[in-house]
Image: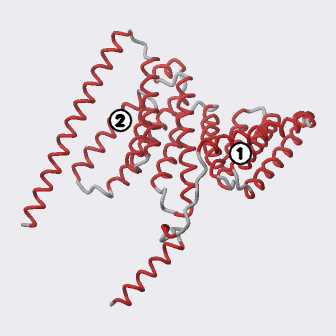
Amino acid sequence: MRRADDAQTNSLKAKLTQSGIVLNASTLPATLETPWFVRVLQAFSGWLAAFFLLGFIAIGGVFVVESAAASLGLGLVLIGAAFALLRAAHSDVLEHLALAISLAGQLLVGWAAIEHWNNAAYVWWSMLGLQSALALVMPSVTHRGFSAFAASVALYLAWVTAATGMAASGIVLCALTALWLNEFRWPRRIKEMQAWGYGLALGLLVTQGLAHAGHPLPFLYEALDSNLVRLGVWMSVGLVALAQLILFQALFNKQPLASVRWVTYAAGAVLLGVTFYVPSVGQGVVVMLLGFAIGNRVLTGLGMLSLMLAIGSYYYWLDATLLTKSIALLVMGTLLLGLRFGLHRRWEARIAHSSDGSVDNDA
């Protein structure tokens, strides 16, 4: 019997080791981490060195920007050099130096795309492809996060040219939700998954700010009289609903109560109705709930910031007097506090009832 237990334990250890999970970590020598202020100074040194280096290159190669082919070639060379430097980098100085060189190469590639195509949509789609590839292949967590952020912004700007920018935010929201819910599915890729997740979250927040700067309210859509814009609104609401469904299904695997499911689906339907008239509220709530579900405080904070930005934008652009706005805020705040109080009391009563039932069954 003991031999069987030892064999099973060894098999489990082998599987954990193959997945990249180190056992008996306490017996390994502790590594000293560099203080944050030293890392900031090293990052600043790397960017400063990169600016001097790129300045010398720019002085000797001004003619490059006059040719799309030369800009593309030099940009790809700089990106390749950054890739090689990142593979050999073992310090923050070299990593940030490589990141700055890569950024310069991306700008040259973008300039070549602008010179080649007169259509802004083609430029942004090409940048989306470039950033997506860099997010997958670059051997740096910082670079992967930055590329994921840039890819989400490029996707939004590409869809804006077709007057359906809000739908792009919905696509990023669905990708963000699915990514964070599968954070630990591949143990060897946890850092990369987190980098992509944070990059998409920041990109979603930035695109939300860009959308609000463009007056993304339904009553302003009516003034534009554009069917494509209305289609973008409907697509955005549908994608928010899909992200909700993905999140709810993951949560319901841990919550078998049918009554809780129906209440959750009803609340989700109400949220979708609000999202149609107050854009970005749905995505803010989904990101906040996602942060609560996986225990990520940073993601929860980003969701709360997104929600406040959506409500603040709606309050600012709403065509009503300050008295009407104040009364509306007072009523909504009172209703939300009452809803929170009622749900909290009901949840406590249900937990007490379940515990009493378990005690009776044990008796």
Quarter occupied by the C terminus = bottom left
Residue 168 visible in the current orientation: no
211 to the left or right of 125: left
User: Of callouts 2 and 1, which one flags the residue occurring earlier in the amino acid sequence?
Assistant: 1
Colouring rule applied to residues: secondary structure
Disc on res. 96: 1
Query: Could you tell me which residue is drawn at 27 percent across and 30 percent down?
Result: 336
Q: In the image, what residue type sits under mark 1?
A: His
Q: In the image, what residue type sits under mark 2?
A: Leu
76 to the left or right of 190: right
* Label 2 – label 1 distance at C-alpha: 42 Å
Q: Which residue is mark 2?
A: 271
Q: Is residue 274 above or below residue 288?
A: above
Residue 155: percent from left, percent from top: 62, 40
Residue 66: percent from left, percent from top: 90, 33
How many labels were placed on the picture? 2
Residue 48: percent from left, percent from top: 76, 37
Quarter occupied by the N terminus = bottom left
